[in-house]
Image (cartoon, rainbow, N blue to C red):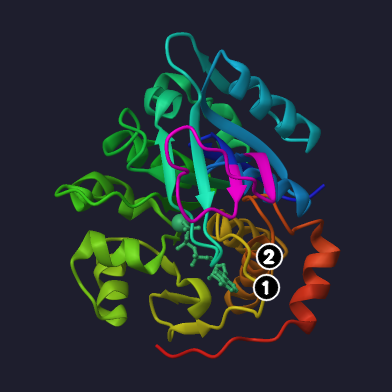
Amino acid sequence: MGATVVSMGIHILDILGRYMNKIPEGQGVEIIEEIRLTVAGTAAGTSVDLAKLGANVIAMGAIGQDEPGNFIVDTMTRYGIETKYLARKSNVQTSCSMLTIRPNGARPAFHVPGASGEFNLDDVNWDAIANADYLHFGGTYLMAKMDGKPTGEVLKFAQEHGVVTTLDMIGMPRPDMLEILEPALPYIDYFMPGLEEAEMITGLKNRQDVIKFFLDRGVKHTVFKMGGEGSSIAGHGMDEIRLPAFKAKVVDSTGCGDSYCAGFIVGLSLGWSLEDAGRLGSACGALVVSGLGSDAGIKDLDSTIAFMKQAEPLPMSV
Ligand SMILES: Nc1ncnc2c1ncn2[C@@H]1O[C@H](COP(=O)(O)OP(=O)(O)OP(=O)(O)O)[C@@H](O)[C@H]1O
Ligand SMILES: [Mg+2]
């Protein structure tokens, strides 16, 4: 069995269809190629990828007492993910997204925040965290009751118990972005947002300035995801590692970032260098972008490593 990872945060049922350019007029019907349901979200999507890569995954978050919630539990259980710590809220629906994928892989979405917004400290199983190897916290800005100080409290507890912490988010432009994240920053070992999100939080545009901004505020490493441009890994007392993305047929970018986090965590857990962990993350991203849905493309660790070894790097322009 691989490393034990508590993956805490937003749990979303994604309903995705490809390809769509416009909503049909009136009550019109448009025939499309494919529609899927997937377990997704910055915590749950990463959980599925982690499980496929052989990690021992414990899910923590909140879902509703409804069909989407049942689907999430059933699907995660099939992947061998522990779901007993998922809180089932009675008066709110499971978080759901409808994603209408464009032919270029872009994904305009409709979202009901739902139960993830009700997830709070009373739902946290502290023993499970203390006994884990990693805590992946995913979904800052979409968890009204966990955002801010509670997030800091959970990450601090994890670090005090020798658990490595990673954090990813859904960047929603708002004036208090930094204020919300700040209590968590000193307790994050690997801060893993999209670079655009990190820029949004800081108001800075130069990547080196953005890296310094977060390292100065206590983050141990920044791991910025940059889409087809790849990623950047930095930390105290080391030079920035700039990694390319791998060439892939782009179908749908949903879940690329979540899968990068899963690959990176598994790479770390195997004792790999930061660079190689990032390469495994990139391989996961390239596999996920080549299919519909955040769980597409990745099969298991061996095939992902095999893909990584023969994958063609894309050029980096920034
Ligand atoms: N078009 C692409 N081609 C190849 N690889 C890609 C592509 N898009 C993303 N990836 C891979 O997936 C990784 C993560 O994707 P991305 O940078 O979009 O994450 P993100 O910013 O968290 O986005 P999101 O939250 O929208 O998934 C990238 O670092 C890259 O390695
Ligand atoms: Mg992301």
For mark 1, give the secondary structure: loop
Report the side of 178 relative to 109 (left or right): left
Q: Position of residue 223 (x, y in %)?
A: 46, 68
Report the side of 12 relative to 122 (left or right): right
Chain-order first, disc 1 or disc 2: 1
Q: Position of residue 66 (x, y in %)?
A: 58, 15
Give the crowd class for mark 1: few <14, some 14-19, many >=20 residues within 10 Å: few
Mark 1: which amino acid? Lys
Q: Is residue 133 visible?
A: no
Determine the main secondary structure of the stretch shown in magenta.
Answer: loop
The alpha-carbon separation of the residues under discs 1 and 2 comes to 5 Å
Viewer-closest of 70 and 167: 70
Q: Is residue 183 magenta?
A: no
Q: Is there a contact, CB below 8 Å, between mark 1 and mark 2?
A: yes
Q: Residue at x 52, y 59 (%)?
A: 102
Q: Residue at x 73, y 32 (%)?
A: 75
Which labelled disc corresponds to residue 290? 2
Viewer-closest of 295 and 201: 295
Q: Position of residue 249 (x, y in %)?
A: 67, 73
**The residue at label 1 has a CB less than 8 Å from ligand 1:** no
The region drawn magenta spans 16-38
Mark 2: which amino acid? Ser
Q: Is residue 22 visible?
A: yes
Question: Residue 287 is drawn in which quadrant?
Answer: bottom right
Which labelled disc corresponds to residue 249? 1
